Amino acid sequence: MTRRTWLLCLIPFALSAQVTSDQLVKAAQDPKNWLTYNGSYMSQSYSTLAQITPANAKNLEQKWVFQVDSLQKFENRPLVVNGVMYLTQPPNDVVALDARTGRAFWMYRYNNAADARHCCGAINRGLAILGDTLFMGTVDAHLVAIDARSGRPLWDTKVAEGNAGYALTLAPLVVKDKVIVGVAGGEYGIRGFIAAYDVKTGKEAWKFYTIPGPGEPGHDTWEGDTWKFGGASIWVTGSYDPELNLTYWGIGNPGPDWNPSQRKGANLYSDSVVALDADTGKLKWHFQFTPNDPYDYDSVQVPVLVDTAWRGRPRKLMLWANRNGFYYVLDRVTGEFLSGNSFVKVTWAKGLDDAGKPIVTPQPTNTPVFPGVQGGTNWYSPSYSPRTGLFYISAWEDYASIFLPQEVEYKEGLSFTGGRPVAPIIGARSPSLRANQINAGAAESIGYGSVLAIDVRTGQKKWKFDMIDVTDAGILTTASDVLFTGGREGYFHALDARTGALLWKGSVGGQVSAAPVTYELDGKQYVAVAAGHAMFVYGLRE
Amino acid sequence: MRLELWLGIALTSLSLAAQEHVGQYAQADIERGSRLYAVNCASCHGVGGDTIPNVDLKSGRFRNATSDEDLAKVITNGLQGTAMPPHKFDAAELKGVVSYLRTMREFGMGAVALGEASRGKSVLEGKGACLSCHRVEGKGSRVAPDLSDIGSIRSASALERSLLDPNAAMLPVNRPVRAVTKAGRVVTGRRLNEDTYSVQLMDDKENLVSLNKADLREYKVISTSSMPSYKDKLSASEMADLLAYLLALKGTN
């Protein structure tokens, strides 16, 4: 054998790395796989697959189900790479499944520290992948790298102190040679940060505190020591623009959640979006949605990046339906506010000024504030279809809370919420992120769920699909103009993305609290969604 | 000890022990606990303690604890594999939280006058004619909600409100509905569940009925209760007796 032949023999092995950096940049052009939490760096939750259409969606049938061995809330949005589905069994077990049959190749079990404190459930929303390595954040605030072929751990980096209320619940974002995460813990008086780690070693590359320290711009938006435990957590994955080399992240509520008099000032960068240099973590710009927030209106929504004509010229936009009930369009190069309007009933502000700042209208004590504590929308992945020009969100309509602020002292590791929100109807259950029961009294007078389609050109609603119960489901659209989503009622829906008409529904018997994904195998399109305590996968009847 | 013995015998007989609660725990502890509860517990468990499935703190329905010591252990250590995190409370704070959990149903019942439960039973079965719609321990109609454990799930003041002003106190989920099918059949009843496509109800003949909304010509949720107000129907002492009886209804198992 010549030396050259030897080399040729080696090539298949040398090329075996599954997902390259370039593939991640071009993920939208690789619709057979689902390579990042929101499908691409633009986070449009849109796929160019088009085999399932409005005409044949009625022929969808269940192909397989994978039940997780956990009764924790299942908010996972899986990855699919070359026929393998990677999901997290709550909270932090990673499972590799055959995406055809749902049969497991391997499972990696991670044991969280017993003293980990996390506010709202032992949750994990997903994984990231680069090469042959999967990355997972844990509820005890570690970042773990796992071999995607064997399920063996490669490295484990402690990101923050789990017993001080820090947790990682989001899917990490890989950009070039770094894996980026942010810390949850907005109900525990953490000081939030976003940090990047070397994909090979797990060594910290940069760290951006979401609350500026002494001497940094914005520090004066906090009074006294309040910046040290002011929250500003991160619990949903950001986006990335490779041309600008900027990564965008939504930042959570300031703490204590409901008592703003304990933290006077705008409380930057809580309830903001930040644009960071992906190599250094340096802040390029920020935009704050809700200054000095008294309602827990986290801005952890997914930054949806769209390149389209805006008022007659092509522009790099960012679309943002915020928990505070307003829909915003920003220029993502500069952070400039372009337009905004409410998309559900809003009473805490009467509108936005020319700079996008809310014109606040505080409601009298003990009266309902719209939207309520879970917001007009929340962390549920929205979708944008370049074909329809519509932006799709899961909304909570006509939904209010009464906010009861209370003085609270910060103690490390203890809940730091400063009061409580209550339902406007005495004795009625308020819809909450925790409630698992279907339609548990969440009747008409305390809000209902809907899918809203907003025309990006006008900011106005194009159509609306109403449900009885509220929804925590994310949204997926495809190039055949089919929209997939679910809700609390235990259905998985296919809607016509142009009209909102129901095309098909499947019973999943438990609430959908995640966004669907789609992939192609053997020339067949599949759609997968986590619901209840199982992953359900559908395809067309053959 | 007596409390623990009861709890050891049957978890659900907690409700019996609940009668012992007021007085057993120091008011200062209860008040301290209520403040800690609002800040540390209510965001997941809800103000009323019942937002986690199968857990109802105020009626003593716990999944992982029977004694006060168990409760303290769960609060301190959390429950691995669940959303319940550990908490750093000092001894006095912990005592406060446990005291509050054990008394939260009674906490704030304040100004409601309670009479004699045995006389209240006669009011319920006689003058009040409550059993013509409600059911208690196997007696009466199923058309309105069963009251056999109402004392575990409602405070005295909420019960009083329901009796005086049923429309205002009616929970959305209990609203009566009226449906007319495309074939003209009229169905009226109490809504048990509803989603975007269907509604499940108990009709006025005690049948469990599920209707597809697509098959209906008319579907209306009625916001007035069919229960009469007892404001002018019962004397103050009859009302106090009835409330005492309702509060004593803790379920049969």
Image (spheres, rainbow, N blue to C red):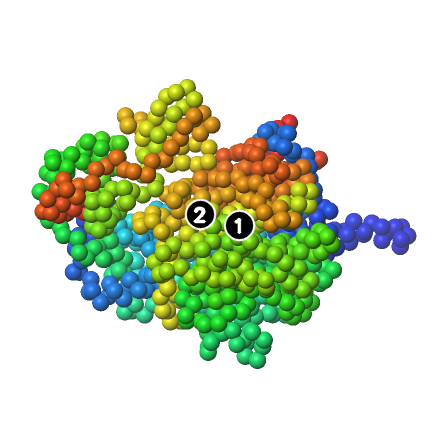
Mark positioned earlier in the residue sequence (2 or 1): 1
| Spot occupied by residue A411 in the image (x, y as percentages of width and height) | 40, 71
* Subunit of label 1: A
Identify the secondary structure beneath mark 2.
Answer: loop
Residue at the image point whose x is 72% and y is 46% from the top:
A30
| Spot occupied by residue A49 in the image (x, y as percentages of width and height) | 69, 40
Query: Quick one: B131 or B55, which is closer to the camera?
Result: B131
Q: Height in image: B189 above or below A31?
A: above
Residue at the image point whose x is 31% and y is 43% from the top:
B171
Residue A194 falls in image quadrant: bottom right
The reply, left or right, for residue A525 in relation to residue A260 is right
Asked if residue B176 shows in the view, the reply is yes
Residue at the image point whose x is 32% and y is 39% from the top:
B223
- Mark 2 = which residue? A398
| Spot occupied by residue A154 in the image (x, y as percentages of width and height) | 62, 60
| Spot occupied by residue A508 in the image (x, y as percentages of width and height) | 49, 37
- Mark 1 = which residue? A343
Query: Quick one: A251 or B21, which is closer to the camera?
Result: A251
**Residue type for callout 1:** Phe
Query: Quick one: B8 or B114, which is closer to the camera?
Result: B114
Circles 2 and 1 on the same chain? yes
Identify the secondary structure beneath mark 1.
Answer: loop
* Subunit of label 2: A
The reply, left or right, for residue A359 in relation to residue A54 is left
Number of labelled discs? 2
Residue A21 falls in image quadrant: bottom right
Query: Image quadrant for the C terminus of chain A?
Result: top right
**Residue type for callout 2:** Asp
Q: Report, in whole angstroms, how far the alpha carbon at label 2 lies from the one at label 1.
A: 11 Å
